[in-house]
């Protein structure tokens, strides 16, 4: 007995699923415009139902409708309905659609057709437009002039049920709750345009698209609010695009994060005008490209100003801190961020976004130099020579009282100066070396102006200064340095062996060389000697 009961249940469930399957293949109710727009008490003439035909055509002679309110009065197709169809197609074309509505021929709805059932042949095209339809839709009209509604608008909780059938073996039923209908703001309240969408399983979704037919339409609309902005800013661009493909944002004045999405971020990188032009385009179902040009107004750009900006810095100066706020209030960052003594070049200030300010570049010169002072005999005269590491150095010579005694020369004749002045030994000499606005000061004290060491070596076999002759000096050690302070020659118990060669015996280049002589009295004598060939 239990086995038989189990078999009966299986058969019963199979019959139910078979029945549901046949109904879904026959047709499905997809949408009801419950609260249509009207000119007053004629709402019952503008309500609509959308359903989808299955894999086989349907015979309209077998159609019946069980409305929640009112009775089924059959269909009508005449010159009045034909005129309505013409008006609807004209409206679709004006809205940018490439689809159409048709009345059935031979009382037959084709397989897979999308169908709109209108509750009256007095339907108002103006009040409930179809919009930009991009498919073929079949439309049928009930033979009714009743102004009374066929459904139930928003009200207390109560279910409403609609059944459409095409003979005994083909029907579909849907239900909705009046209290769940919504207005244009999405609130549960009365409002024209209240719509119910039904999934294939009958689940209801409550929407409100305003005064429009319950059909799928294409939408191509830029929806962002345009406000003036600045070059360098990033703005959000939004659009509503339905029923289109190949979406494309383009502009010669910036970049998009998602140029093929309906919503994207756009960064304005440049513009020579007072606005930036952006183009939004997409292709509809008919292969036509629709485009819209959007103009983004631009605010005036501010040029950051930095008062007292350091354009040159001396190597011995305290490094300045680059200000992140300009004198006229622009905030930004520097690159490089800090002043580097080892970097002489451009420092770029980039304003933070949202300030309508331009990027600027400032050049900072870093002056770094050094020099040394050497006292030595030139013939019978004691002279001081300044040797620097830059050809741009300018020298100013001063006595111990700070009085300028010579300029624009890299050497000073101490012997000649002391002969003509009241100064006596020891004599302090102050030298100011400058490059640009940078000054470096050094001092040297001269204790003797007796000169017996030659100032030049010219090994050209003319028997004059062919070697560095120190035979009368009792030298324990001689060291020769080049202008950079590098030891190039050294000899203990030196007499007269140096004629311009380095440690390896190779001749050194022409130039000024410096010596350090350690005498038998344990005294060090320094000076310079000029090497020429």
Image (cartoon, grey):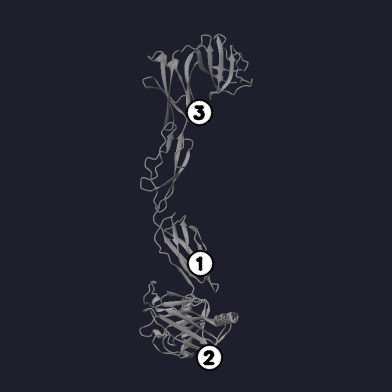
Q: Is residue 243 above or below residue 374?
A: below
On the question of residue 126 being in view, the answer is no
Q: Earlier in the sequence, mark 2 or mark 1?
A: 2
Which residue is at a point 50% across and 14% down the rendered structure image?
525
Label 3 or label 1, whichever lies nearer to me, is 1
Q: Which residue is mark 1?
A: 281
Q: Is residue 462 above or below residue 155?
A: above
Q: CA distance from mark 3 to mark 1?
A: 66 Å
Q: Position of residue 427 (x, y in %)?
A: 41, 16
Circle 2 SS class: helix
Q: Earlier in the sequence, mark 3 or mark 1?
A: 1
Q: Is residue 77 above or below residue 376?
A: below
On the question of residue 234 being in view, the answer is yes
Which of 495 and 36 lies nearest the eye of the viewer? 36
Tag 2: Cα neighbours inside 10 Å, few (<14), some, or many (≥20)? few
Q: Are marks 2 and 3 in contact (CB under 8 Å)?
A: no
Tag 3: Cα neighbours inside 10 Å, few (<14), some, or many (≥20)? few
Q: Is residue 137 above or below residue 484?
A: below
Label 2 or label 1, whichever lies nearer to me, is 2
Horizontal side, residue 41 vs residue 481: left or right: left
Circle 1 SS class: strand
Q: Position of residue 283 (x, y in %)?
A: 53, 70
Q: Earlier in the sequence, mark 2 or mark 3?
A: 2
Which of 437 and 62 lies nearest the eye of the viewer? 62
Q: Which residue is mark 2?
A: 61
Horizontal side, residue 402 vs residue 264: left or right: left
Q: Which residue is mark 3?
A: 389
Which of 263 and 114 lies nearest the eye of the viewer? 114
**Residue placed furthest toward the front:** 1
């Amino acid at each position: 007995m239990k086995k038989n009961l189990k078999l009966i249940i299986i058969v019963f469930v199979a019959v139910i699923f078979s029945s549901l399957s046949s109904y879904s293949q026959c047709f499905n109710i997809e949408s009801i415009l419950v609260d249509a727009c009207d000119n007053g008490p004629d709402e019952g003439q503008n309500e609509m139902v959308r359903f989808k035909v299955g894999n086989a055509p349907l015979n309209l002679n077998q159609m019946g409708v069980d409305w929640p309110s009112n009775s089924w009065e059959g269909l009508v197709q005449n010159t009045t309905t034909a005129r309505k169809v013409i008006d609807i197609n004209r409206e679709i074309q004006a809205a940018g659609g490439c689809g159409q509505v048709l009345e059935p021929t031979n009382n037959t709805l084709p397989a897979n057709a999308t169908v709109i059932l209108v509750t009256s042949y007095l339907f108002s095209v103006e009040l409930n437009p179809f919009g930009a339809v991009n498919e073929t839709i079949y439309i049928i009209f009930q033979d009714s002039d009743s102004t009374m509604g066929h459904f139930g608008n928003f009200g207390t909780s109560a279910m409403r049920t609609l059944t459409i059938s095409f003979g005994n073996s083909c029907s579909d039923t849907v239900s909705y709750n009046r209290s769940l209908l919504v207005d244009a703001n999405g609130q549960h309240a009365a409002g024209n345009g209240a719509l119910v969408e039904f999934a294939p399983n009958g689940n209801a979704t409550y929407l409100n698209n305003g005064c429009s037919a319950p059909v799928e339409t294409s939408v191509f609309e830029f929806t962002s609010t345009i406000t003036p902005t600045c070059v360098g800013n990033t703005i959000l661009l939004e659009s509503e695009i339905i029923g289109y493909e190949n979406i494309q944002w383009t502009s010669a004045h910036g970049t998009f994060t998602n140029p093929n999405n309906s919503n994207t971020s756009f960064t304005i990188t440049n513009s020579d005008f007072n606005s930036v032009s952006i183009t939004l385009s997409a292709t509809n179902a008919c292969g036509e490209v629709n485009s819209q040009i959007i103009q983004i107004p631009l605010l005036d750009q501010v040029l950051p100003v930095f008062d007292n900006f350091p354009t040159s810095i001396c190597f011995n100066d305290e490094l300045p801190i680059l200000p992140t706020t300009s004198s006229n209030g622009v905030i930004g960052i520097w690159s490089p961020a800090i002043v580097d003594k080892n970097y002489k070049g451009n420092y770029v200030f980039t304003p933070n976004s949202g300030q309508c300010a331009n990027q600027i570049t400032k050049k900072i010169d870093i002056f770094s130099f050094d020099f040394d002072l050497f006292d030595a005999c030139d013939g019978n005269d004691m002279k001081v020579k300044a040797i620097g590491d830059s050809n741009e150095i300018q020298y100013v010579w001063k006595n111990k009282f700070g009085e300028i005694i010579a300029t624009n020369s890299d050497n000073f004749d101490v012997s000649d100066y002391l002969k003509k002045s009241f100064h006596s030994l020891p004599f302090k000499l102050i030298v100011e070396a400058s490059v640009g606005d940078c000054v470096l000061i050094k001092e040297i004290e001269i204790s003797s102006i007796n000169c017996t060491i030659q100032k030049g070596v010219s090994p050209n076999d003319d028997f004059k200064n062919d070697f560095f002759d120190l035979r009368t000096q009792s030298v324990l050690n001689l060291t020769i340095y080049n202008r950079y302070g590098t030891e190039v020659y050294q000899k203990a118990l030196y007499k007269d062996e140096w004629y311009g060669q380095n440690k390896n015996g190779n001749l050194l280049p022409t130039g000024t060389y410096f010596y350090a002589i350690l005498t038998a009295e344990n005294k060090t004598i320094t000076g310079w000697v000029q090497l020429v060939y």
